[in-house]
Amino acid sequence: MKIRGMRWWIIVLLFLAAVLNYIDRQTLSALAPTIQVDLGMNDQEYANVINIFLIAYTIAYLISGRVADKIGTRASLFFFVAWWSIFNMLTAASRGVTSLSFYRFGLGLGEAGIWPAASKAVSEWFPAKERALAIGLYTMGATIGATIAPYIVIPLATYDYTQSVPEIANWLGNGTGWRVAFILTGLAGLVWLIPWLMIYRKPEKSKLITADELAMLQTASNAENPDSLENVNPWSWKQVLSFRGTWLLLLARLITDPVWYFYQFWFPKYLSSDRGLSQEDLKITWIIYLAAGVGSLLGGIISGQIVKKGVMPVASRMWVMLVCALLMPLSPFIATAAGLNASLTLTVFTVIAALAWLINISSLIVDIVPKHSLGTVFSVVAAGSTLGGIIMNMIVASMVTGPSDKPAGFLDTAFHAVLDPILNAVQGQGYAMWFLIMAFLHPIAWLLLKFGGIYRYSKV
């Protein structure tokens, strides 16, 4: 059987994997107020749990791309999804900060792998003019996952299991609801593995691709890589780390990705503490994550349309990113807006811009790096993303909390040794200071890319 437009069915699978990835990730954020009470965690400990997840994410980024390059897209994504799904289910066994941290560390080791593997799938199945849209579509899965996560996990967490299913309540004990949420969301990932194994192959090995689609992909690949040697000589680690484009993109993501991490991990807490929303009211965060999905889709569509008009892919991405950077100075007004509706409206615009930026900077990696080394370079660049997220996490935690009344953990000690002057300077300043900082991050990163010479790199 042949399937027309097989590459778009591949994107459907990647989209669903991204949905599950972010549901699993956002389960903790959506249920943070409840879990913190049940496990006796303060905000600093919550920040440490997030950082442990991000440290694992960073470690996994550094190796998962290499794994994808070595064992291939199909096998690597199977492994990554299975790993993180199992650890998400195990999170239900958490009995305190230590065990919760351990399971979230395991989750981070698996979840990072989807992004280099998915980018590798796009490089195998899509020509340059469609890459940004393809990346936008599966990244929109992440934002859809974040959008629907509260509507899935909050009802699961607040359901009265003691009255209706006492056996489950007796088995899981204190916090039955949020524990059930982790088990069921993790189980969904294991179900996803079945169609992935059945469907995914490289185009030239797929029995489902039509002859016309295969010919189109081969023609596009030959046009991008006229030198056949490029397809058989993977870069060494020395080549990866000596490539200037690697460091430009790494620094740009380190500077800008903290914005999206903030909206994932801290924005629900901001709405709870500064805007007075209850656990049930936090369902309204679907608006923010839907905006992220719109940004993902728009970023890909607009960039792709510019490429179709004959503009080089790298220049196309940079034009879209410039517009995004010019929208980010709206950020400080989110905290100062008089009402919740005005604050959320401003947030929608900045989130759309942040995600359209993220789609295009991810497309830049696919545009300038050969397929054989794409996973490795993507991983190194993405490690900058999580490092930025860790730094943001410590800064925001310091902004919204005073000195902790609990002994400092090893993460607190380690990060304060490096960031102590900054953390002391912002301590107790509140969320408004972070919203002000976010206004400048994308413009700085865009200037870094432009004057760092990103335009000189292009495969097309």
Image (cartoon, rainbow, N blue to C red):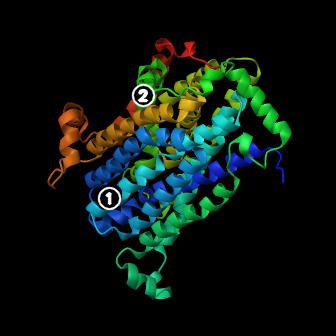
* Residue drawn at point x = 65 percent, y = 33 percent: 132
* Mark before the other along the chain sequence, 1 or 2: 1
* Residue drawn at point x = 39 percent, y = 52 percent: 269
Residue 238: x and y, percent? 41, 24
Residue 327 can be seen, yes or no:
yes
Instruction: For the N terminus, give its image quadrant.
Output: bottom right
**In front: 325, or 455?**
455
**In front: 194, or 226?**
226
Q: Amino acid at mark 1?
A: Phe
Q: Residues within 10 Å of mark 2 (few under 14, many from 20)?
A: few
Residue 347 can be seen, yes or no:
no
According to the picture, the residue beneath numbered tag 2 turns out to be 237
Secondary structure under the numbered disc 2 in the rendered image: helix
| Corner quadrant of residue 212 | top right
Foreground mark, 1 or 2, reads: 2
According to the picture, the residue beneath numbered tag 1 turns out to be 102
* Residue drawn at point x = 29 percent, y = 45 percent: 397
Distance, label 1 to label 2, CA atoms, is 30 Å
> Is residue 305 depicted above or below 227 in this figure?
below
Q: Amino acid at mark 2?
A: Trp
Residue 105: x and y, percent? 36, 53
| Corner quadrant of residue 145 | bottom right
Label ID, residue 131: none
Residue 444: x and y, percent? 44, 21
